[in-house]
Image (cartoon, coloured by chain):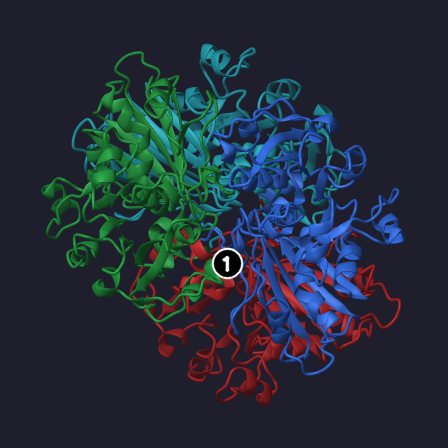
Chain colours: A green, B blue, C red, D cyan
Amino acid sequence: MGIRVAVAGASGYAGGELVRLIAGHPELDLVAATAHSQAGSALSAVHPQLAGLDLTLSATDPAVLADADLVFLALPHGQSAALAAQLPDSVKVVDLGADHRLTDAAAWESYYGGPHAGAWTYGLPELPGQRAAIAAATRVANTGCYAATITLALAPLVAAGAVEADDVVVVAASGTSGAGRAAKTHLLATEVMGDLSTYKTGAHQHVPEIKQATGARSLSFTPLLAPMPRGILATVTARPTGTADAADVLAAAYAGEPFVRVLPKGVFPRTAATLGSNACHLQATLDRDSGRVIVVSALDNLGKGAAGQAMQCANLMLGLPETTGLSAFGVMP
Amino acid sequence: MGIRVAVAGASGYAGGELVRLIAGHPELDLVAATAHSQAGSALSAVHPQLAGLDLTLSATDPAVLADADLVFLALPHGQSAALAAQLPDSVKVVDLGADHRLTDAAAWESYYGGPHAGAWTYGLPELPGQRAAIAAATRVANTGCYAATITLALAPLVAAGAVEADDVVVVAASGTSGAGRAAKTHLLATEVMGDLSTYKTGAHQHVPEIKQATGARSLSFTPLLAPMPRGILATVTARPTGTADAADVLAAAYAGEPFVRVLPKGVFPRTAATLGSNACHLQATLDRDSGRVIVVSALDNLGKGAAGQAMQCANLMLGLPETTGLSAFGVMP
Amino acid sequence: MGIRVAVAGASGYAGGELVRLIAGHPELDLVAATAHSQAGSALSAVHPQLAGLDLTLSATDPAVLADADLVFLALPHGQSAALAAQLPDSVKVVDLGADHRLTDAAAWESYYGGPHAGAWTYGLPELPGQRAAIAAATRVANTGCYAATITLALAPLVAAGAVEADDVVVVAASGTSGAGRAAKTHLLATEVMGDLSTYKTGAHQHVPEIKQATGARSLSFTPLLAPMPRGILATVTARPTGTADAADVLAAAYAGEPFVRVLPKGVFPRTAATLGSNACHLQATLDRDSGRVIVVSALDNLGKGAAGQAMQCANLMLGLPETTGLSAFGVMP
Amino acid sequence: MGIRVAVAGASGYAGGELVRLIAGHPELDLVAATAHSQAGSALSAVHPQLAGLDLTLSATDPAVLADADLVFLALPHGQSAALAAQLPDSVKVVDLGADHRLTDAAAWESYYGGPHAGAWTYGLPELPGQRAAIAAATRVANTGCYAATITLALAPLVAAGAVEADDVVVVAASGTSGAGRAAKTHLLATEVMGDLSTYKTGAHQHVPEIKQATGARSLSFTPLLAPMPRGILATVTARPTGTADAADVLAAAYAGEPFVRVLPKGVFPRTAATLGSNACHLQATLDRDSGRVIVVSALDNLGKGAAGQAMQCANLMLGLPETTGLSAFGVMP
């Protein structure tokens, strides 16, 4: 008899990945998977990769979820707070949505609109002090996928004073699963295959989270939609303050980390190498012409950028070894 | 201290997948990974998805391999026999190459040329009697990826007399990893993305293996190269002999099988649902116009079509539960 | 002052391709482009590739269309007949929909349902006698994309008695644009990239059209959805009746044709080579094991499979050189 | 009898695209297409999209080329200068290689190594004064694909003093055809599909060309390899100097241009919209958080980034209308 977990929002891509991870986790039992319009469907009808996992999606009922030891909320952004408020304190919660990430209510209101639900413990174990905080928490706000990619690349450099916190420029490309599973014309395969484009150019709602988590004071962030299902590649540039080697600073920050890896000198990250895993790969160099520090960061937006990260946090919250049921090795090619 | 295994040909795609599976297997220790031109390279330099796995590729030396309890041979076709002959009988061997699959020396010589190395136990546990044979064997010839896809779709129907063994027509599309990792112009991303084509049209060397394993007497097999890295989808058509429901015959044949799944009525296989897993998904129907039985079969050519299948066989040969270290659930989307 | 043409259904993929072809055509003036829900939008807002073409989509009003010399109907299947009935006889019409393709009312009702609108001249100029018929017609039913691909491969062989008309087996894979532009979850990029699947397995509604156009008496047709935006590759197999070389029969049938090309011996078609063009590439061989004739056929489903074919017919109907504004050379890579 | 043109390096991707454009050009006759290792092959054996174009690749012989009125050099970088030196002055030359682009010999030697061949007229007609210079030239150095994408986005802003020339940050993603047609493992479809990565990170050899053409004084340029065959999307950020609207500045600079288009406010470029065309699409905005100007630029690396641009220059040099044989409309989807 394992630890009882539930997934709310199991019909989406992050929800499906959570169920896959739970199915392969030696200590967890999935007691409920809930959905909205898909409630009543077989889980495997919604997620063909889970054929053989015999479970029916139920409606998102707080009473059902309250029966679990830990609940993952993988709901559309903006729907977590109301549901979380109906769960007893005894139930641990990891929220994959944005509702509880920002400490600054004004930033929330400016970028998302609506009332601010308040901040929970931020779910990025590799930040200084955060691992213990997560282990002690009953409510954890999982990082966003872009924020995870960029924060792992930049936060140690800002914290060490190795780069200026002003005028950070980031361009990050994401696979399409980051845009969710709702049927929209511009996300059709016919539109995306063979195509690259920017979106929310100049005004992405994740900027406040990224600034909060990285310590950047000024951030130009341009996201790209890339013709692949999964993966984020971020190119993070900032002006160096001195002569510290950025790759060395990163390597020191992540020494001993099971999932964050600074690659050997001269080897740069590829998103495919992280597919299906909880790994984040990093590399840094100095730009020859401009002198800027360039950090390249890659992860799976549904792995370390969502479900994998959430599982890592859940392991910590449940007192399990942090790596249980997770892999650092991607499915490649 | 686990069971000691080695991989010869670890620099290729199947070899890399084997190492990934071994790294996640609770009972196996990888004691050697060998290669030819890449000997001396870090494993993670050749397989970026294995970053953090600290191992160097060594030259393919029988003495090194002989130190393992079980050796996986993931060599280019035609190179297994000579190496296998140098390994002591006490070392179990699973050969992912074609060298030891065919029982018919004439067929070997006709399609492959060169002397026939003799047949080993055929590594498809779901065939009647084969699970026990593999468990008892010290030498197993892993199925080819096309043969696995097609045999799982067709063999029970031929065995049950539900379809005619003559005039079977198969069209099967494979992702590009099935073509290996050698640098060839026609396999460049620029050539393949956005493109579909047939290859070896009318004369594929796997026809004898497929006929041997399925019981088909006459087979038109046309392979397609599809613009995706992994996955095989086979469309197998044959004339029915009576009124038996093909899907029911398949469901009965695979009842209780952990990795082969006949999908619910009306649901057809998708390759993506099997990515990175050892699953094979099947469905059958009657063609409305022609009356032919159509069976659709999907698997991951590097999973159930190569490395996953090999691990399943190895588990049987080593007396471990057959599913150890393997997943039936694909990484999707 | 050129010939006045209009496009009804200009917001879809075939409609957009028609507008692109018209824009590059030296004799045609586009006087109206109509749409349903997109009426009122700038054409270039709906088709980004037409940026700079200054035209607004109007509502689909027969009075507007009646002002043209020739109207292309690129409407969802089933909507052409009602609109066409409202256009005066003096306006030439090419219908890209299925409504007027079938001569057999019973087949129409069985596969499509609803009343049969009656058959128009079939728009495949390369069929014997059809070029003159199209040139003389004021109403032409453009071929379907699968029908064009398969008919060009098979019809000359059936007509010549080189293959049996019974037990023809076809597997054909299409890029996603063939499924249209409506937003559907299973057509999202996230679902399709890296995936292959069959659809409408065993019962596709184009079977009667294909039988009518090819002369096949019994047809097993399985369509696949391929992870690419455009292109169809068909594998057509039939039993030979004698020793005629199928490639020679095809070469003789298409001698002098500007858009249908039998490739040199040993060279097989690739869809990418036809992208954006009106070309169809063919090759044939005998299957070594089964003795079946295998014909492989490739074209662009929006080119020779839809808009290109429609323009070729329009050129004939308008007394222009058949190749005007069309290319036989694909955009590749 | 048209104008006689030849293509040296016709076996590569840019060479193939040049031949396609020449085949559709009403005034040009292709009198020779030369290659190195492919000399003697049928052109259509090397470029399947040119099936039906009956020409054999010849060896790259200056005497053969000298017989043309204009020669396109589409050779590997570094091979143009030696060949060009052997062509008489009476033969016009457009060089698609880098050899004659840089005016600064020191920059050449620093980034490329070897002796500097000297600069030719720079082949970007949309730069002030450049159209006339090209029309008057007999030797033109075609822009590089990245340089074209970035220069069209940035040069008018620097020239107008609307942005600072220091600390320009560019991230640009290219489809794989930009990497050429040589068989390399890291460019295999299996490696690239589903993957994003940077390359030549921090030290790309096109930086001097981009600085020369744009007027940027300091440039951080990071290129990405994207999983698609064609297309470049550049994200160019620079600090504004005042309150000038960058999109307005660009629109004014390109008013009347046939191929460069600033999209309507709020619409951002997509590479697919330029596929197979000579179009470049632009849009600009202010980043909300950092205040940087962001310009997004998209084109087809083989179109406006190579062969299309070269044809535009050739038209000017030959006294033909600049748009002859070129389209501003992409093949999409």
Q: Quadrant of residue B114?
A: top right
Q: Residue at x 41, y 50 (%)?
A: A21
Is A116 on the left-hand or right-hand side of C88?
left
Q: Mark 1 is on which residue type? A: Leu
Q: Quadrant of residue D40?
A: top right
Which quarter shows the N terminus of chain D? Answer: top right
Chain of residue at mark 1: C
**Residue B143 position within the rendered picture, expressed as x and y whole percent measured from the top left:** 70, 51
**As drawn, C142 above or below B321:** below
**As drawn, B87 above or below D200:** below
Q: Secondary structure at mark 1?
A: helix
Q: Nearer the viewer, residue D168 or D322?
A: D168
Q: Nearer the viewer, residue B302 or D151?
A: B302
**Residue C174 position within the rendered picture, expressed as x and y whole percent measured from the top left:** 57, 61
- Residue C51: tell me if it is visible: no
Is D11 on the left-hand or right-hand side of D321?
right
Q: Nearer the viewer, residue D219 or C261?
A: D219
Is D308 on the left-hand or right-hand side of B18?
left
**Residue C78 position within the rendered picture, expressed as x and y whole percent measured from the top left:** 46, 79
Q: Quadrant of residue C188?
A: bottom left
Q: Which residue in the structure is indicated by mark 1?
A: C21
**Residue B70 position within the rendered picture, expressed as x and y whole percent measured from the top left:** 67, 38
**As drawn, B219 above or below B327:** below
- Residue C333: tell me if it is visible: yes
Q: Residue at x 52, y 14 (%)?
A: D118
